[in-house]
Image (cartoon, helix red, strand yellow):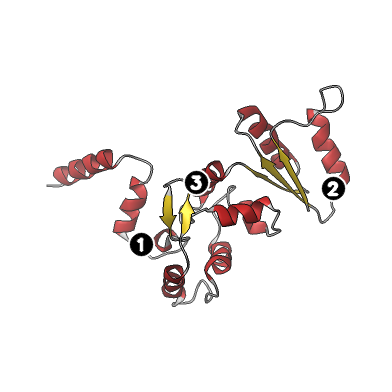
Amino acid sequence: MVVICTDGLPTDGDGGGYGAFGEAVRAELDGLPVRLTVRLCTSDDDVVEYWNNIDAALEHVSVDVLDDLESEAREVRRFQPWLTYGQPLHRLREFGAAWHVFDLLDERPLHEEEAAQLAEKLVGELPDPYADSFYKTLGAAVRRAPKTFDALTRRAQPVIDTSAFPGAPFSLYHFLRRQAYGISSFLFLVFVFWYLATQV
């Protein structure tokens, strides 16, 4: 495992070398069981873009590029709206915890099996995700688990929103609540009243 903490771009002694770094990493680590975690200590757009491009370019090297907690939580929320991405999970990733599902959190929605594996690591043993008792057991485990601080809402939340979990039974209430996330309550209420008025 290699962890790089940086607030800039890699350079050689002459101030160049941006492209050479990716080639050097590929030459040294390609095919080896090595994991590279890049912890960004800046929000500079050029730096973030550079390291994300390195992540995308190094197909055969396990690379995970991490922003600060709030930025990473925002990226994870796009793909995993059911997960409260808190500091404990962020620290695990920063210190290079080697598990492929961690790499996927900010890249694509997890499949039901992957989400169930992550949930089991967060709240304890769970039945098969296709078992009838899975969602009931998951709900009970989430209620027993300690809440985690959500960097986006700035308050303690359950680590998993079971209503938004992949494959969860549909609930109109939770669907509407998720739609309201990110827009003001006032605009959401205006929309609801308008919709109800047009249905009469």
Which quadrant would residue 21 be assigned to in this image? top right
Amino acid of disc 3? Arg
- Real-space Cα separation, disc 3 to disc 1, in angstroms: 20 Å
Decide: is 43 above or below 118: above
Q: Cβ–Cβ below 8 Å for labels 3 and 1? A: no
Amino acid of disc 2? Leu
- Real-space Cα separation, disc 2 to disc 1, in angstroms: 45 Å
User: Which callout, 2 or 3, points at the residue further toward the start of the chain?
Assistant: 2
Amino acid of disc 1? Phe
Residue 57 relative to residue 118: left or right:
right
User: Which callout, 2 or 1, points at the residue further toward the start of the chain?
Assistant: 2
Residue 113 relative to residue 63: left or right:
left
Residue 91 relative to residue 131: left or right:
right
Decide: is 83 above or below 151: below
Which quadrant would residue 182 be assigned to in this image? top left
Question: Residue 186 bears which disc, if any?
Answer: none
Residue located beneath label 2 in the image: 29
Badge 3 density bin: few <14, some 14–19, many ≥20, Cα 10 Å: some
Camera-near label (3 vs 1) is 3
Of the pair 185 and 91, the residue shown nearer to us = 91
Camera-near label (2 vs 1) is 2
Residue located beneath label 1 in the image: 170
Badge 2 density bin: few <14, some 14–19, many ≥20, Cα 10 Å: some
User: Which callout, 3 or 1, points at the residue further toward the start of the chain?
Assistant: 3
Which quadrant would residue 33 be assigned to in this image? bottom right
- Real-space Cα separation, disc 2 to disc 3, in angstroms: 30 Å
Which residue corresponds to the image point at 65% horizontal and 53% vertical from the top-left? Answer: 93
Question: Residue 78 bears which disc, if any?
Answer: 3
Element under label 1?
loop
Of the pair 76 and 159, the residue shown nearer to us = 159
